[in-house]
Image (cartoon, grey):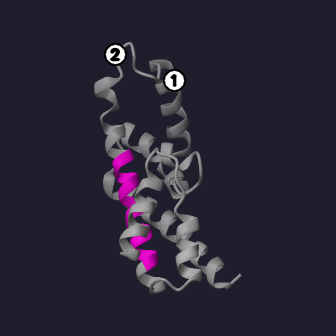
Amino acid sequence: MVYLSIFFSAFISATLLPASSELLLSGMVAKQMGAIAPLWLFATLGNVLGSCVNYYLGTRVEVLSHYRWFPVSERSLAKAQVHYQKYGPLSLLFAWLPIIGDPLTLVAGVFKVRFSLFLLLVSVGKGLRYALVIALAVGVF
């Protein structure tokens, strides 16, 4: 049950919904509520899969973008595309950052980043972030 809790917390945290899994993970590690490696794995997996939901939603944006009620103007979408092309898919390494990370994964879907590259970059960034959270929780730093 511990591993499912961190999985779902991390999953929700990676979507556009406001949530934070770092506090739960660090608390679980500090209270030794599970083995460290599986906690890291389930947190990382949940967070990456949540980002995949954002990516998928991004791939569907073009279907909705022509409606008047669509919240992003074509101008804003074009501006975002120029910005994304400037910094490229490597920005996905920062998908773990608060506030900007989740939209980065959505934008990757909008601009159709190759999914294998998306998965690799997002997994590396989020895996390293959770490793750092665990290291801080056990007092390595």
Horizontal placement of 26 versus 124: left or right?
right
- Say which residue appears at 34% left-offset and 17% top-offset: 66
Q: Is residue 42 within the magenta segment?
A: yes
Query: Where's residue 110, x and y in %?
Result: 38, 37
Q: Where is residue 106, by image quadrant?
A: top left
Residue toward you, 56 or 83: 56
Specify few, some or many for label 1: CA neighbours under 10 Å numbering under 14, 14-19, or 20 or more.
Answer: few
- Say which residue appears at 60% left-offset and 74% top-offset: 132
For residue 90, above or below residue 43: above
Specify few, some or many for label 2: CA neighbours under 10 Å numbering under 14, 14-19, or 20 or more.
Answer: few
**Residue beneath disc 1:** 76
For residue 3, above or below residue 57: below
**Residue beneath disc 2:** 67
Highlighted range, magenta: 39-54
Select label 2 or label 1 by which is in front: 2
The C terminus: image quadrant: bottom right
Residue toward you, 86 or 54: 54
